[in-house]
Amino acid sequence: MSELAWVPQSCTLPAEERPLRVAEWDALFAEQLAAVPRSQPLTLRLELKDGPGVVDQVRDLAEREGGCCSFFTFTVTAGEDGIVLDISVDAVHEPVLDALAVRAGEQVSR
């Protein structure tokens, strides 16, 4: 199975751009991710460390991802303790959210 095999057919991002987008997510996870709590099957919460320009980076990435994968709903909340990115999907796309959670979790454990 290829690294991007979990990307759903409904994603409209051109195939040649997908590795670049995955790399953007990986960089965000590696540099800013503090925790990945998962209390609901259809929602993933990413707790991110704040820093100069980070909230804008998160909002930009979430907006672009929502543009090609409209099944995602992103909510970015900036607070004193950091940034929270909630990602929700419908039941059909739960496996995609699961794959994203695994990928993020791999970065937290490094």
Image (cartoon, helix red, strand yellow):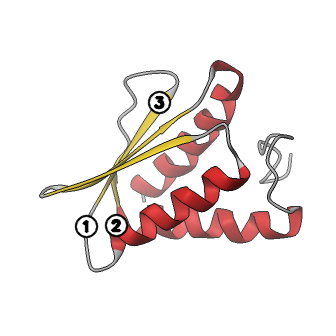
Q: Which SS class for mark 3?
A: strand
- Name the front one of labels 2 and 1: 2
Residue designated by label 1: 50
Residue designated by label 3: 43
User: What residue is at 35 percent from the left and 71 percent from the top?
Assistant: 54
Disc 3 marks a residue whose amino acid type is: Thr
Q: Position of residue 11 (x, y in %)?
A: 79, 47
Residue designated by label 2: 55
Q: Which SS class for mark 1?
A: loop
Q: Which SS class for mark 2?
A: helix
Q: Quadrant of residue 44?
A: top left
Disc 1 marks a residue whose amino acid type is: Asp
Q: Residues within 10 Å of mark 3 (few under 14, many from 20)?
A: many
Disc 2 marks a residue whose amino acid type is: Val
- Whether tag 2 and tag 1 are in contact, CB under 8 A, the answer is yes
User: What residue is at 27 percent from the left and 63 percent from the top?
Assistant: 49
- Whether tag 1 and tag 3 are in contact, CB under 8 A, the answer is no
How far is mark 2 from mark 1, CA to CA? 7 Å
Q: Is residue 70 above or below residue 31?
A: above
Q: Looking at this rendering, what residue extends furthest in the left direction? A: 80
